[in-house]
Image: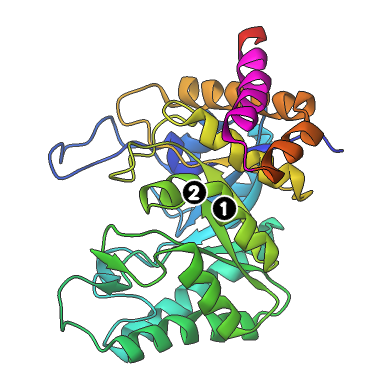
């Protein structure tokens, strides 16, 4: 088994605004500043880059130079199809011209994926959906959601596209809002290069079990990527991974290990008030403990307990493996 690699969204190392602190939670940083910070995180190997690159008009070559200096690689490119230009939707915008613009922007991002030799184009159509009853025609909205992805995937058969689903925000109700609906759409699209990225926090605040969601996506051969964080189950807080639901996170990784799923373990955290490097280091330290706990987990005894639906026996086995390792580390 290969040594586990870790990654993070480059936004982890940016500074943030919200509707209250409109002046931001820190001095603005460019993507070059963020890459430099990310390079100081121990055991971080990959970053996911927003496209266009934030904080300046930077070329691919300039970004590549900064990445090389920081010792980082690119796992994915995330086109920003959720900004003001797409406030009424990207794939589902009622204006065909805006839908075309979304297609063009993602096509540009495809070229960046090729340049950086990244693993996929990540699609997070955060503005696709609706807010009110009767606002949209659900049939045409869903068709546009699938057609938008399908057209890109068919035009770029050599690239992988991952859809990151989320229940809500910024739209009150997002088109790709759950693991089941996203898989349904992907299967309808019917192309082998379309999969999903499972965000642990999106799953649990959407009322899912992230472990169950991962198994479903794996069963359909559609789990192309994942990232982790934590929340209080009522909002996408993007807190430190393992800070609130360590046992559920452990079960999520148990499902990945059980199915021999191999990929980068990514962080999607938003440290508004904390030091971003410290938060990343702390998360990776926890994830490394999870990885070692999986090595010591008694899979055979756990399978026996699960075959009898013996909750107490299963919990004892899982807790012993995780908490013993955490105590050591």
Please state the horizontal and vertical placement of residue 67, each as a whole percent of the image.
Answer: 63, 41
The magenta segment: 309-326
Q: Is residue 248 visible?
A: yes
Residue contact between numbered discs 1 and 2, judged by CB atoms under 8 Å? yes
Is disc 1 placed on a helix, strand or loop?
helix
Q: Is residue 41 above or below residue 109?
A: above
Please state the horizontal and vertical placement of residue 320, each as a whole percent of the image.
Answer: 65, 19
- Residue drawn at x 68%, y 71% is 159
Q: Is residue 164 above or below residue 47?
A: below
Mark 1 highlights which residue?
A: 212
In the picture, the disc for residue 322 is none
Q: Main secondary structure of the magenta part?
A: helix
Kindly indicate the quadrant of the structure image that contains residue 89. bottom left
Outermost residue on the top side: it is: 328
Task: Mark 2: give few (<14), some (14-19) or many (20+) Cα within 10 Å.
Answer: some
**Quadrant position of the N terminus in the picture:** top right
Kindly indicate the quadrant of the structure image that contains residue 217. bottom right
As measured in the structure, the alpha-carbon distance from the residue carrying label 1 to the one carrying label 2 is 5 Å
- Taking the magenta stretch, the answer to whether it contains residue 323 is yes
Q: Is residue 62 visible?
A: no
**Quadrant position of the C terminus in the picture:** top right
- Taking the magenta stretch, the answer to whether it contains residue 325 is yes
Outermost residue on the right side: it is: 1
């Amino acid at each position: 088994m290969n040594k586990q690699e870790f990654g993070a969204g480059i936004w982890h190392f940016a500074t943030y605004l919200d509707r209250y602190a409109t002046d931001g939670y820190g001095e603005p940083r460019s993507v070059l500043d963020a890459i430099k910070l990310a390079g100081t995180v121990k055991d971080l190997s990959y970053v996911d880059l927003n496209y266009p690159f934030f904080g300046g008009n930077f070329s691919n070559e300039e970004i590549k130079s900064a990445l090389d200096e920081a010792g980082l690689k690119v796992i994915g490119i995330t086109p920003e199809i959720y900004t003001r230009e797409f406030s009424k939707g990207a794939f589902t915008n009622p204006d065909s011209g805006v839908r075309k613009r979304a297609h063009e922007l993602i096509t540009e991002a495809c070229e960046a994926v090729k340049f950086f030799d990244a693993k996929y184009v990540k699609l997070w159509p955060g503005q696709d959906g609706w807010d009110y009853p009767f606002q949209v025609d659900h049939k045409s909205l869903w068709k546009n959601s699938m057609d938008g992805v399908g057209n890109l995937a068919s035009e770029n058969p050599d690239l992988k596209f991952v859809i990151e689903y989320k229940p809500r925000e910024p739209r009150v109700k997002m088109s790709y809002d759950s693991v089941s609906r996203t898989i349904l759409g992907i299967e309808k699209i019917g192309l082998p290069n379309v999969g999903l990225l499972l965000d642990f926090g999106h799953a649990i605040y959407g009322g899912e079990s992230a472990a169950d969601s991962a198994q479903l996506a794996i069963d359909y051969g559609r789990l192309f990527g994942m990232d982790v964080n934590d929340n209080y189950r009522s909002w996408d807080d993007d807190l430190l991974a393992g800070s609130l639901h360590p046992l559920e996170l452990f079960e999520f990784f148990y499902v990945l290990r059980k199915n021999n799923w191999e990929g980068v373990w990514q962080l999607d955290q938003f440290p508004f008030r904390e030091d971003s490097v410290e938060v990343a280091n702390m998360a990776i330290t926890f994830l490394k403990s999870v990885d070692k706990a999986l090595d010591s987990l008694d899979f055979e005894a756990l399978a026996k307990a699960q075959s009898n639906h013996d909750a107490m026996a299963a919990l004892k086995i899982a807790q012993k493996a995780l908490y013993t390792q955490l105590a050591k580390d």
